[in-house]
Image: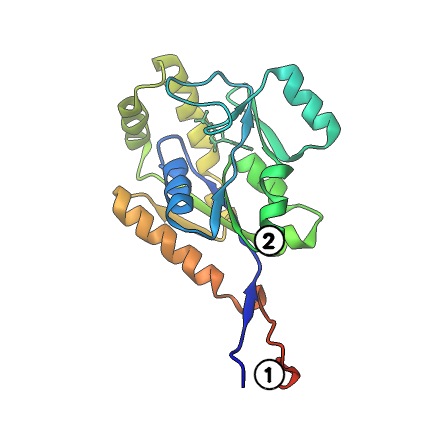
Amino acid sequence: MGEWQFQRSGLLCVVSGPSGSGKTTLCRRFSESDGAAVYAVSATTRAPREGERDGVDYHFLDRAGFEAGIARGDFLEYAEVHGRLYGTLKSEVLGHLAAGRDVLMDIDVQGAALVRAASDPAIRAALVDIFILLPGEAEIANRVRARGTETEEQLAVRLQTAREESRHWSEYRYAFISSDRETDFATFRSILAGERCRSHRLRNITAEPNLSSD
Ligand code: 5GP
């Protein structure tokens, strides 16, 4: 008698949270440490920060290039954040999901709402949305200042966005308050571990007919 074999469909993990919540680091670290997960590299019209590489951190596009992509239907979702366009290319997501890989996306609350409202039932079934909260505004300012990539003016814009975005935490299936890096990573990993075991994601592909579910 052969062994039971199961195939699992991929998760579409959407992570939002204010600047400095560590969402990008969590998504990247998880995808680098787990062979079944990939990070969806977004496209943006914002300028690269020092050390950021095109095609690795973002696909950096000018506004005309981004708008041409919108017109072609290249984007799964896109939104204007801090006066710049940000979006997820379908090519970064759909093939991986079809192959049973988990896709991690770090996107804003508008983008998350668009993914939640997607007409494709496979996208909605794959979706796992997580909001990372920070304990207060002072902590957001501290973390953004510590990163050292933003001017005081940009910081003020990010604080305002954080205030607005943080109102949406309860629209997400999961929300947790960020603590230290390791604790956050353990929380993140356990959410994904649980989601991977949801029965509707599994399909019994055992060859012998008497072993398939009935
Ligand atoms: P940053 O400029 O700090 O890299 O990102 C600014 C904001 O844009 C963050 O809230 C981030 O989650 C969001 N963002 C990054 N990529 C995307 C995307 O592909 N789509 C949407 N809707 N938001 C994104």
SS of the residue under disc 1: helix
* 173 sits to left or right of 114: left
**Percent from the top left, x then y, of residue 148?**
30, 19
Residue plotted at (65% across, 46% down): 117
Decide which of 212, 71 is in the foreground and name it. Answer: 212
Residue at the image point whose x is 46% and y is 44% from the top: 169
Whole-percent x and y of residue 110?
57, 35
Q: Is residue 66 left or right of residue 179?
A: right
Quadrant position of the C terminus in the picture:
bottom right
Residue marked by disc 1: 211
Which is nearer the eye, 96 or 108?
A: 96
* Crowd around label 1: few <14 · some 14–19 · many ≥20 (10 Å): some
Rendered view: 82 above or below 11: above
| Place of residue 194 in the rendered image (x, y in percent of width and height, measured from the top left) | 43, 62
**Element marked by disc 2:** loop
Local packing at callout 2 (Cα closer than 10 Å; few below 14, some 14-19, many 20+) is: few
Mark 1 in CB contact with mark 2 (< 8 angstroms): no
Q: Earlier in the sequence, mark 1 or mark 2?
A: 2
Task: Give, as a three-letter code, the residue at label 2.
Answer: Ala
Q: Tell me the residue at 66%/15% (across/down).
A: 64
Residue indicated by mark 2: 99
Q: Is residue 78 above or below residue 184?
A: above
Q: How many numbered discs, if any?
A: 2
